[in-house]
Image: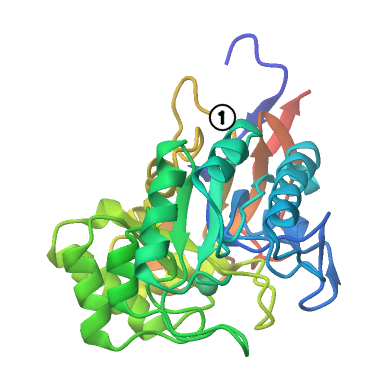
Amino acid sequence: MSGAAVTVDAKGTALAPGLIDSHVHPVCGDWTPRQNQLGWIESCLHGGVTTMVSAGEVHTPGRPKDIVGLKAMAIFAQRAFQAFRPGGVKIYAGAPVLEQGMVEDDFRELAEAGVKFLGEVGLGSVKDGTTGRRMVAWARKYGIQSTIHTGGPSIPGSSLIDKDMVLETDADVIGHVNGGHTALPDDQVKELCERSPRALEIVHNGNERAGLLALRTAKELRQMHRVILGTDSPAGSGVQPLGILRMISMLSSLGEIPAEIAICLATGNTAKMRNLNCGLIAPGREASFVFLDTAQQSAGKNLLDSIQKGDLAGVGMVITDGAVSIQRSRNTPPATRVPEVVKR
Ligand SMILES: [Zn+2]
């Protein structure tokens, strides 16, 4: 490209938009108390993820549950992660969890302060559809997008959110429609796909069989544009630096969808459903990319075939906002070919 400051020779590898993780739980910096691990976000960069959306900073030790406190924490997290990008990963954080007693003005104030997402409805004290629906509508009115925890309790003390509450609350994203960790019964998963028009988020931390059911149901309904991917990491079940790549290979191989469609779920689909300016390779979009190639010794005859056979892609380079963030990934299986920086 003429005028480019950096020139990369792709060496025949595939260029994809940087992957998006629609569901993470960051806390502070690049640290998570759930597994007491440092560097988990930068590790996900090595799995091709360039953008993350917080589903609530709920693992924060001593998380405030009073309304002034939860608003302060959300604004702090939004500011902190806007200023701090581990390895270049962009994190949309500052996702407050709904608590009883919040009023319309709280949502207006949060929106004015730059908060764009709610944490999972159901992780706080709001556990009924009527209150959830009222608060989600206030959030929507002020441009804040919402998501809801779907399925069994995630940790002791949290509770079941069934299809009735999900349908009544009508959040913009049906968070982990395949459970996080525990899925709803099959008929409820199908009903959510059929009766709600909202985004269907499938996560690595959920029930894989239920994830495949949601995928197949969306396919039958010809509503694949609603399917988006997340990890729900870190959640104590393993920080999953390759979680999105694993979802792509799992859904493509077992869900029998073309690999390129599976990649679209984690890029363009998620960007559209989440209103993000990334996820597509197009003028005016953020210049965040991942270079992929067939993992060495994969039985697949090319990259897409290797993914459809269930292997992970090898990451050879990641670019975030036009800058080379990493070259050969330390976490994926080694890519057969890797791009080269030819001019800096
Ligand atoms: Zn959840």
In the foreground, 67 or 95:
67
Task: Give me the residue at 42% from left, 74% from top.
Answer: 150
Query: Is residue 301 in view?
Result: no
Is residue 88 shown left or right of residue 305?
A: right
The vertical placement of 162 against 64, above or below, is: below
Task: Give me the residue at 25% from left, 56% from top.
Answer: 224
The vertical placement of 187 against 97, above or below, is: below
The location of residue 136, given as percent across then percent down, is 42, 53
Task: Give me the residue at 50% from left, 27% from top.
Answer: 285
**Where, quadrant-wise, is the C terminus in this rendering?**
top right
In the foreground, 83 or 305:
83
In the foreground, 299 or 114:
114
Direction top: furthest residue:
3
Task: Give me the residue at 52% from left, 64% from top.
Answer: 120
The location of residue 158, given as percent across then percent down, is 57, 83
Q: Residues within 10 Å of mark 1 (few under 14, many from 20)?
A: some
Q: Is mark 1 within 8 Å of ligand 1?
A: no
The count of marks equals 1
Q: Quadrant of residue 296?
A: bottom right
Is residue 187 shown left or right of residue 236?
A: left
The chosen color scheme is: rainbow
What is the three-letter code of the residue carrying label 1? Glu
In the foreground, 123 or 67:
67
The location of residue 145, given as percent across then percent down, is 46, 46
Element on which disc 1 rests: loop
The location of residue 113, given as percent across then percent down, is 66, 34
The vertical placement of 186 against 57, above or below, is: below
**Where, quadrant-wise, is the N terminus in this rendering?**
top right
Q: Quadrant of residue 192?
A: bottom left
From the image, tell me which residue sits under label 1. Answer: 286
